[in-house]
Amino acid sequence: MRIDLHTHSHRSDGTDSPTELLENAVAAGLDVLALTDHDTTAGWPEATAAVPAGLRVVPGAEFSCESETGRGGTCTVHLLGYLFDAEAPAIVAEQGRLRAQRRARVDRMARLMRADGYPVDPDALMAELPPDAPAGRPHLARALIGVGVVATVDEAFRLFLHSRGRYHVAKRDTPVREAIAMVHAAGGVCVLAHPFAVTRGPTVTREVVAALAEAGLDGVEVDHPDHAEPERAELRALAGEHGLLMTGSSDYHGENKVNRLGQETTSPEIFQRVLAMGTGAKVIER
Ligand code: AMP
Ligand code: FE
Ligand code: FE
Ligand code: ZN
């Protein structure tokens, strides 16, 4: 069984529609795929309508959260929620608030670049994004490719959009303990995404992961393309000490990232435990 528990569709910052994503999952030889768009569950209905025979889809989302780093500051962390009730009022409200934050922020970043003379058109960019979509830096990156400022999304991040860059604007993320409680209250399972992905910006210490485990975190994403072997080893040790589930996943974003579907996978035993723990939604299958 091949299981990939972290992927994005064009409902957030991927480039495949949910239907294309599921087709590509079958083509990649996957048996189980989790759909985890940033701060939205808008892709769930299409995934339900389009699920091919033989594929199981775990409905989920990647929640934008804020945590203490353990080194005296705060940083963004991503929390994967699986099998939660998408209609839980707290989740509906918080995801809506975050999508509004995301929109205002991408608009600000585009305006800052425009003011510095880059030929990006903030109004055209914002008009192209569906009003309730979780706008993100990859959308701005695509606009920058469109006007010839950069050649790739990766280059846009490297030169302009990274979290320490002069055009970066922060958004107000959900305090991670609140997000864990919110997902649990909605019957879901919580896994900390790419906890030690150091190339993306500041990350949390192992002590913070341990504290989050005490606060109810269910698992950590160990095998992720942004983790090298030392980070994976450290996360395995932490998971062992604190009884956390260990997942592996690709974080596929279609053409917005080089990550391939099924590049990293989760064991069937862990998947069974996620299934047993998640009570707020059912696995999507034909
Ligand atoms: P945002 O959601 O606006 O904070 O943007 C972060 C998103 O951009 C995440 O989904 C990442 O997967 C993606 N991302 C971060 N760094 C890069 C990069 N170097 N190349 C492509 N995508 C990236
Ligand atoms: Fe993303
Ligand atoms: Fe993430
Ligand atoms: Zn992701």
Image (cartoon, rainbow, N blue to C red):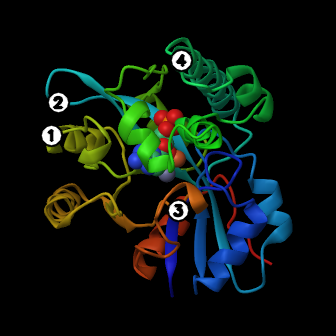
Q: Amino acid at mark 3?
A: Tyr
Mark 4: give few (<14), some (14-19) or many (20+) Cα within 10 Å: few
Q: Is residue 279 above or below residue 100?
A: below
Earlier along the polypeptide chain: callout 3 or callout 2?
Answer: 2
Give the foreground label among 2 and 1.
2
The residue labelled by disc 2 is: 70
Task: Find residue 27 and report its horizontal and vertical position in percent.
Answer: 65, 84
**Residue type of the residue flagged with mark 2:** Gly
Mark on residue 252? 3
Indicate left or right for 25 with 272 as reference. right
Q: Which is more foreground, mark 4 or mark 1?
A: 4
Q: State which mark lies toward you, 3 or 2.
A: 3
| Spatial CA span between label 3 and label 2 | 29 Å
- Disc 3 under 8 Å from ligand 4? The reply is no
Q: Nearer the viewer, mark 4 or mark 3?
A: 4
Depth order, front residue of 233/228: 228
Location of residue 83 by image quarter:
bottom right
- Residue wearing tag 1: 207
| Pointer 4 or 1: first along the chain | 4
For the residues marked 4 and 2, what is the alpha-carbon distance in whole angstroms? 38 Å
Q: Is residue 191 left or right of residue 9?
A: left
Q: Is residue 166 left or right of residue 208?
A: right
* Nearer to us in this view, 110 or 44: 110
The disc, 4 or 2, on the residue closer to the chain's N-terminal end is: 2
Q: CA distance from mark 4 to mark 3?
A: 33 Å
Q: 278 or 193, which lies in front?
A: 193
Dot 3 surroundings within 10 Å: few (below 14), some, or many (20 or more)?
A: many
The Cα–Cα distance between marks 4 and 1, rounded to whole angstroms, is 44 Å
Q: Which residue is mark 4?
A: 117
